[in-house]
Structures are given as C-alpha cells and as structure tokens.
Amino acid sequence: MAKKLRYGIIGCGGIANGKHLPAISKLEDVEFAAFCDIIPARAEKANSDYAGGKGKVFADYRELLKQDLDAVCVLTPNSSHSEISVASLKSGKNVICEKPMAKNYQEAQAMIAARDESKKLLTVGYQSRYRSDSLYLKQECESGALGEIYYAQANAIRRRAVPTWGVFLDEEKQGGGPLIDIGTHALDLTLFMMNNYEPAYAVGTTYRKLNNDKKTGNAWGDWDPKKFTVEDSAFGFVVMKNGATIVLRSSWALNITEVREASTTLCGTKAGADMLADGTLLINGVKNGRQYTLKPDLNAGGVAFYDGASAKPEDIEAQCFAAAIRGKGKLYVLPEQAAVVTRILEGIYSSAKSGKPYYFE
C-alpha cells in the first residue's frame, strides 16, 4: 500500500467538522498529521476526534506549515483564504481552500500566482459540482443537448435561514453576506454548466431590509441586529462577452415561498434545464412538434467519480483531491474558474455600492 498522504487542517470550526474532516476521514490513504485553530481547544478536539490525539496541534498556521505535509485544507474565514493559501503553496503544500476562493479578485490572482510558482495543486471547495444532478446536467451541457445557453438563473434563495454562528454576519471577515456565502455556489454551478468565464459587465443591488428584525422566525434562532453587518439579500444581472445573460439571486432572509439554493436554471437554443429545491432535475424542450419535460432518475447508476449513487458530494470532492495529489486524476474545480466567480461577485458588490454598472476589463 502506498504511503499515506499527510494532511494539515487550518481552521477547525463549523465547515471543518461539518464537511471536510468527516469526508477526509473516510479515505484510507490519508492521515491527519496537524491541526491549527486560533482557538486551541478546537484544534485539540479535532485532533482527538479524527487523529486519536496523534496529530500535532498549533494556534499559528505558520508553525503548522513547517511540518512535513502533503496537503493543507484552508477552512478559515474568507478574509484569510488568500493569505494562508499563498503561504501554504509557497511552503510546498498542495491546497484545497474552502469557498469562496477569496474576498476579491486580486487576492484570488495572488493564489494562482503562488500555485504557478510552487508547481503545487490548488483547488476550491465547490462541492455542489459533485451532486448527482450536477454531474448529469454537466454531461448534457457538454454533449450539446441544450445548444447555446444564452440565459441562466443562479439561485441561492432562503426564506429565513440566516447563519447566526461563527463570523457569517461579520462583513470584515467574510466580505459580504448571502451573495459571497451561498450565491457563490449558485454562480459557480451556472458558469461551469455554461462553460463561460468571460464576463462583460454586471449590475448589482444589495439590501439590508430585515437586519433589524427581532422576532425573525429564523431557522437557527433570532439574529443579533448589532452583529448583522452584511446584506440580507443581493441580486446581480451579469452580461457575458458573448451576450449571454445570468441573473443571480441570493438571500438569507426574504419574504418569498420559493426556496432554491445552490441551483441553476439554464435556457439554451435546443433545450432548457431546472435544478429544483428537492434535488430533482428537469430537462425541457420540443420534440416532434411537442413540448416535453424529462426527469432523469438520479438514484440509479453511478457517476463519473464514484461507482454508486450513495456518495456524498463532499466525499467525492475529498477523493478527487487526494487522487490528483497522487497523479491518478485531475482536479474538477480549477482555481482559474473559481477566480472568475470571485471576480463577478466583486463586480456585483461594486455596482451595488456605486449605483452604476461594473465593467470587467
């Protein structure tokens, strides 16, 4: 058996324990060698839970990077994604960084430059690409079944599901609210399906209409209005260089009954597609002069990365990253793609602030 890959975990909070640590722990060829968190107790607990106490624990990521590691998982607030990823790459580590790639395009570009300089791997945690509906739809798009996709909706709509823990409501650490948190998943899926990464301009609006509410009906309990410093909703109208249009809708709290998150709607010259809230995928078009709607059975058969339909998206993500490190596969999420997502989000925020269209040069 090949030598196990040694992983270092930087950031042992919610996304680490809810996604990455459980997924990586299922890999037989990977071991947790080091944990880091600015709250030492978190790193100690992760070490105990996932490494049996055998890993090393640090409060400063720079000390962790001095260790002999094959890969680093950057699972910190958005404001530190670029800084830590760049340092990790320069220290000779392969990196998977949680989404979004960075707070802005300049920081994302710095990460790519460090990747190029180090010759190491860099990917970003857009696990929604590995869902069964996403994998099926990507095959349809690549086969040309939808034709030219010229209109799309990137959907990230919650009715009342504001994350009240961690630093989600902190604009300085996160860079924004639902647009950069969940809108980023919807936009990534949309661009990926369209295979279109050349934006021309964006128009955006952001709202802080419900931040001061007190009896909120929120899924995770009432938020603290004093700490809610980011937008509660944000919307973008993006025109690509080839003329295609993308409407991005994102919200943590909106008076609406339609809830659709990390999903896309695509309209092409030959057919269209809708990702629904319950995981259903619908393909629509016209055949033999009649309208049709196709609903593929996503519970049967396998997917491109895993022989079986039971694998969770985050499990497949972890498998792909480890395989790429060993040279047995390719990265499914390229940093160049993730950087464009960040670039468009930045453009929407800039437009909302200025009240004018934001043009990408």
Image: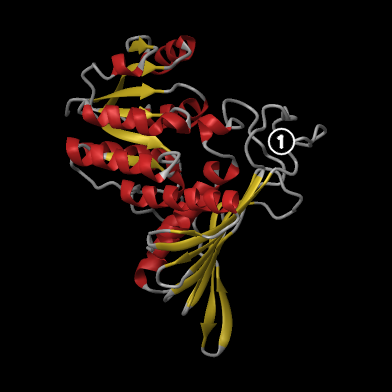
Q: Residue furthest right?
A: 215
Disc 1 marks which amino acid?
Ala
Asked if residue 340 lies left or right of residue 203, the reply is left
Tell me the residue that label 1 is attached to.
219
Above or below: residue 311 compared with residue 241: above
Relative horizontal placement of residue 104, taking residue 72 as reference (left or right): right
Depth check: give the residue in front, 212 or 44. 212
Q: Name the quarter where the N terminus is drawn.
A: top left
Give me the residue at 28% from left, 42% from top.
112
Badge 1: few (under 14), some or many (20 or more) residues near its Cα, within 10 Å? few
Give coordinates of residue 352: x percent, y percent: 59, 51
From what the image shows, is residue 342 above or below residue 68? below
Q: Position of residue 342 (x, y in %)?
A: 43, 47
Q: Residue at x 45, y 10 (%)?
A: 40
Colour scheme of the rendered structure:
secondary structure
User: Residue 261: percent from the left, percent from the top?
Assistant: 59, 50
27 versus 277 height, above or below: above
Instruction: Give whichever of 230, 24 is nearer the camera.
Output: 230
Residue at position x 40%, y 72% in the image: 242
Q: Position of residue 217 (x, y in %)?
A: 79, 37
